Amino acid sequence: AQSVTQPDIHITVSEGASLELRCNYSYGATPYLFWYVQSPGQGLQLLLKYFSGDTLVQGIKGFEAEFKRSQSSFNLRKPSVHWSDAAEYFCAALTGSNTGKLIFGQGTTLQVKP
Amino acid sequence: DAGITQSPRHKVTETGTPVTLRCHQTENHRYMYWYRQDPGHGLRLIHYSYGVKDTDKGEVSDGYSVSRSKTEDFLLTLESATSSQTSVYFCAISESGGGTQYFGPGTRLTVL
């Protein structure tokens, strides 16, 4: 079955430190991949997406993600975390281009220490 | 931000009562979706629509029905609410089935 896994439920980093959030997918073909961020009490905001082409994708707020087919991964990175990055992050895969059915990971909550 | 509104934003209801949540968009997007968000599960697709009067089931559709009589509105109905349907419900829209989905602000539903 198609699935998206985020192995880390909760991550704490110090402000200014680098960040990497992990995402693994299970899908026969190369899916369309997304990272969303959700601040407390808010909806989901798109950070970046990968459809095809360059495997390193740049997004908003200084985030980037790298698609690695050999590892079935799409990890999210940021070189220097700001306190405002504290939020919940979701990785998602689009498994049907005709239906738009997104499968989400369980989410990773990021806490930023001053 | 995509023009998506959800109403109500908060609702408390009792077990066995019917509940309808509304999603309204101003983007004229063809596809609309309803998800529920629960701790430890991320978001799970309930139903989606690929056009007026065209809908299909998602991963967790039992106990829910939807209707779409106009491009801009997508309604989610709980015919007889149960406590297991206490959740945060998100609507999303996209131009195409393979396109990016944009999310509404969510509706927090509590079933007592």
Image (spheres, rainbow, N blue to C red):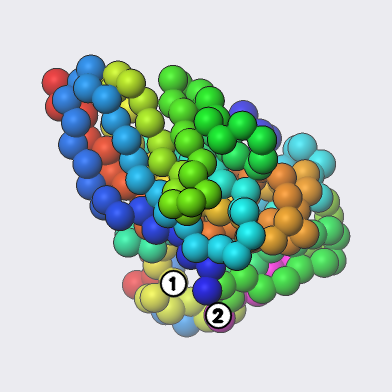
Q: Residues within 10 Å of mark 2 (few under 14, many from 20)?
A: few
Circle 2: element type: loop
Q: Quadrant of the N terminus of chain B?
A: top right
Q: Helix, strand or loop at disc 1?
A: helix
Q: Which residue does the image show at 39% across and 75% down from the upper left?
A: B84
Q: Quick check: marks 2 and 1 in contact, CB under 8 Å?
A: yes
> x and y percent of residue A105 in the render?
42, 56
User: Residue at 29% of width from left, 30% of height from top?
Assistant: A19
Whether residue A4 is in magenta: the answer is no
Q: Nearer the viewer, residue B21 or A10?
A: A10
State yes or no: residue B66 in magenta.
yes
Say above or below: B24 vs B51: above
On screen, B51 above or below B103? below
Q: Viewed as shown, does residue A31 lie left or right of A5?
A: right
Helix, strand or loop: magenta stretch: strand
Q: Which residue in the structure is indicated by mark 1?
A: B85
Task: Give the image location of residue B23, x and y in percent.
Answer: 65, 51
Amino acid under disc 1: Gln
Earlier-in-chain disc, 2 versus 1: 2
- Find residue A54 and name its label: none
Q: Which residues are magenta?
A: B62-67
Q: Dot 2 corresponds to which residue?
A: B63
Give the residue furthest to the front: A70
Front in this rendered view, residue B62 or B18 = B62
Q: Pointer 1 indicates a residue of which chain?
A: B
Q: Who is closer to the viewer here, B94 or A51? A: A51
Tags 2 and 1 both on a single chain: yes
